Amino acid sequence: MRKREEIRRAIEEGQAVLGIEFGSTRIKAVLIDEDSSPVASGSYDWENRYVDHIWTYDMEDIQKGLQGCYRALKRDVAEKYGVRLTRLAAMGVSAMMHGYLAFDGDDRLLVPFRTWRNTITGEASEKLSALFSYHIPQRWSIAHLYQAILNGEEHVKDVRFITTLAGYIHWVLTGEKVLGSGDASGMFPIDTVTKDYNARMLDQFDDLVAEKGLPWKIRDILPKVLLAGEDAGKLTKAGALFLDPEGELEAGVPLCPPEGDAGTGMAATNSVAVRTGNVSAGTSVFAMAVLEKELSRPYEEIDLVTTPSGDLVAMVHCNNCTSDLNAWAGLFKEFADCMGMDADMDRIFSVLYNKALEGDADCGGLLAYNYFSGEHITGFEEGRPLFVRSPESRFDLANFMRVHLYTSLGALKTGMDILLKKEDVKLDKMMGHGGLFKTKGVGQRILAAAIDTPVWVMETAGEGGAWGIALLADYMVRRESGETLTAYLADKVFRDAVGTGMDPVPEDVEGYEKFMEKYREGLVIERAAVDAGI
């Protein structure tokens, strides 16, 4: 009861800090107290759309989702503590990285939002990677921009500002065209010495497109890069009403630099120091490893981004992870409903995931691909979820679920093998967070087998990126003079953190390698399905 009163008083006095993150299927808000602990939350479910061969979110859905999420948070605060949420000590906004939001001089959106999920910039990605001698993935903002130039798209001449989803929301709330280093590093390469966009590459890009006679330079249309802890503006009156149309939230709240889900994942898992890493596994999946040194050469499968503080990170990003798993769980839920069983989705997931641990280490010869969309690491511009078995396969529920858990990390393992086996990157441990790890011990064990590395999941892992951006906002207003983000997280946030570590099971590791042999050989089946337009 005493703790509840302390939290209530902190909220009333405006000492709480808010983090909001736009995920692929859910927008989540987390409110933290002065101990950095989550004390209230709210969420809003949403989904991307495939319109005219483009994965997108409607701008009205963005506003509706933001307001719905915040409304749910206010309701949770009122129910738990009996107070209204009117003041905040700080806040931050995060979202899926990359993609393309382009605006003209009157701040009008020029083309529908092109998200990270699109694989339509292959030519641009290839040419820019060769020009920079630096891997530029298809989902990066600069690849989208250059592809639009190559396509001769009419809107390009009118571009005056491009940003990410987090950058856009932050701009609406504050009027500031800025971006955190981690998110910015997914727009254009960052120089880890200057902590800003790579000057050489900026010049190279301008020279590359000079013949087009465009009325802008690349430096002029990118957001300003900010590091963790730097001031990123304050919530305006218009921004407060955009977030809370009921008009209860006061303006003037300081905001931290907007970040991508990679940066918030690092913060939420205390993975911003060298030799640390984390895996965020939800609709998409990505692994981050903070490097001790640069890689020996560029790899198409490996992206180089930064921590929120601007340190070099190797990133393996895959477009597909749990969508197919979720679809199968939904099918089993439908069956349960037809049978008159009262089983909610949490129960469905728990039963199915744990059943997978009873399966054969190599999944009994079953094969599956979870490609709802294209997967660049394995060379697919489109995806087809597939399940394949031979007459000799051991087809039972345990192996069926195990193969879908394995394949959810199959593309990720392809990239991680480069880091761990070819580049000999050293990781003391990997931290897991996201929906895949919600069922205790299952996703954790599968990931440990995939990368043959100890995997830890903290009790706070379920809070995810919304908690991570709240921590970054808290760091901005409450850090001590000279205190680094690494020290702040290690000494204050995670000092007494409770988590569970799991070493890889040798039999699982061996079985996963056998599965991957079949996975690689079976890619011709996936290719045939895509080429046939099935």
Image (spheres, grey):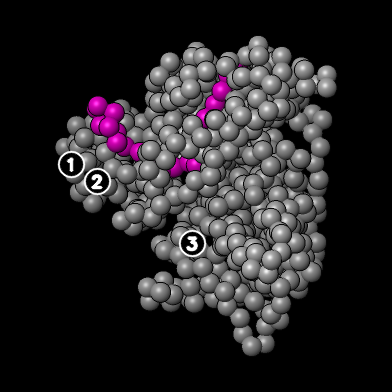
Q: Is residue 128 above or below residue 510?
A: above
Q: Is residue 494 above or below residue 477?
A: below
Asked if one can make out residue 497 in the rendered structure from this viewpoint, the answer is: yes
User: Of the residues under marks 2 and 3, which one precedes in the sequence?
Assistant: 2
As measured in the structure, the alpha-carbon distance from the residue carrying label 2 to the one carrying label 3 is 28 Å
Q: Which label is found at residue 220?
A: none
Location of the N terminus (image quadrant): top right
> Label 3's element?
loop
| Left-right relation of 517 to 196 | right
| Left-right relation of 123 to 323 | left
Which is more toward the observer, 169 or 408? Answer: 169
**Residue under numbered circle 1:** 212
| Label 2 close to label 1 by CB (< 8 Å) | yes
Q: Position of residue 428 (x, y in %)?
A: 74, 45
Q: Quadrant of residue 215?
A: top left
Three-letter code for the amino acid on which mark 2 is drawn = Ile
**Residue under numbered circle 3:** 372
Residue extent of the magenta highlight: 88-109
Three-letter code for the amino acid on which mark 1 is drawn = Lys
Number of residues whose C-alpha sits closer than 10 Å to that of mark 3, classed few (under 14), some (14–19) or many (20 or more)? some
As measured in the structure, the alpha-carbon distance from the residue carrying label 2 to the one carrying label 1 is 8 Å
Which circle, 3 or 1, is nearer the viewer? Answer: 3
Q: Position of residue 460 (x, y in %)?
A: 72, 38
Which circle, 2 or 1, is nearer the viewer? Answer: 2
Q: Position of residue 101 (x, y in %)?
A: 35, 38
Q: Residue at x 38, y 34 (%)?
A: 163
Q: Residue at x 71, y 64 (%)?
A: 341
Three-letter code for the amino acid on which mark 3 is drawn = Phe
User: Of the residues under marks 2 and 1, which one precedes in the sequence?
Assistant: 2
Q: Is 121 included in the stretch rendered in magenta?
A: no
**Residue under numbered circle 2:** 149
Number of residues whose C-alpha sits closer than 10 Å to that of mark 1, classed few (under 14), some (14–19) or many (20 or more)? few
